Amino acid sequence: MLRHALVTKPSISALAAAALVLISCSLARVAGQSLVDNLPAVAAVLTLLVFLIPGVVAGVIAPRSFLWDGLILGMLAAAFVTLQSVQFRLPNWSSSVLYEAIGVWACVSVPSCIVGALGGRFVSWRR
């Protein structure tokens, strides 16, 4: 399974659909931040769902390329969430803090998107 997943090309349509879901989930999560300020466990679960749900979408659309789609989607998610935290203003691209923030978010988003895509693959193959 892993060997086949490594040689399969990523699906652009799956990534595009998952990116749209990622953007809407992330914006909804930010809009609901005030509701979960005093509930850190709920906030953590909602943050994890922001990365899992788009992964599932990518896995359902393109089950054969779940690994690459999850990896690419996770990196896009890390960059999007980092830029969202500075309200999409022009960040200081020469700052190492920006790249560290993207790296920290990638440690959460990449595995979450891959697991979500694997779950989406399982769902699509069970239908």
Image (cartoon, rainbow, N blue to C red):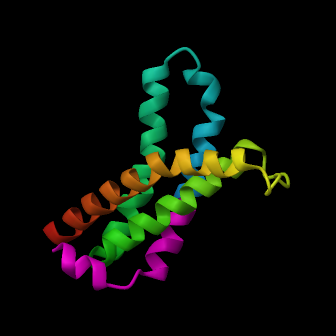
Relative vertical location of residue 12 with respect to residue 94 in this rendering, above or below = below
Relative vertical location of residue 93 with respect to residue 72 in this rendering, above or below = above
Q: Where the N terminus falls, by quadrant? A: bottom left
Residue visible at 39% across and 64% down in the picture? 57
Q: Position of residue 93 (x, y in %)?
A: 79, 57
Relative side of 66 to 38, left or right: left
Of 62 and 98, which appears nearest the observer? 98
Relative side of 92 to 121, left or right: right
Query: Is the magenta region chiefly helix, strand or loop?
Result: helix
Relative side of 88 to 47, left or right: right
Q: Position of residue 64 (x, y in %)?
A: 27, 78
Q: Residue furthest top?
A: 38
| Range drawn in magenta | 1-21
Residue visible at 43% across and 56% down in the picture? 110
Of 72 and 58, which appears nearest the observer? 72
Of 107 and 27, which appears nearest the observer? 107
Residue visible at 71% across and 42% down in the picture? 85
Q: Check if residue 18 falls in the magenta segment.
A: yes
Q: Position of residue 101 (x, y in %)?
A: 63, 45
Q: Position of residue 115 (x, y in %)?
A: 30, 55
Give residue 69's quadrant in the image: bottom left
> How many numbered markers are drawn?
0
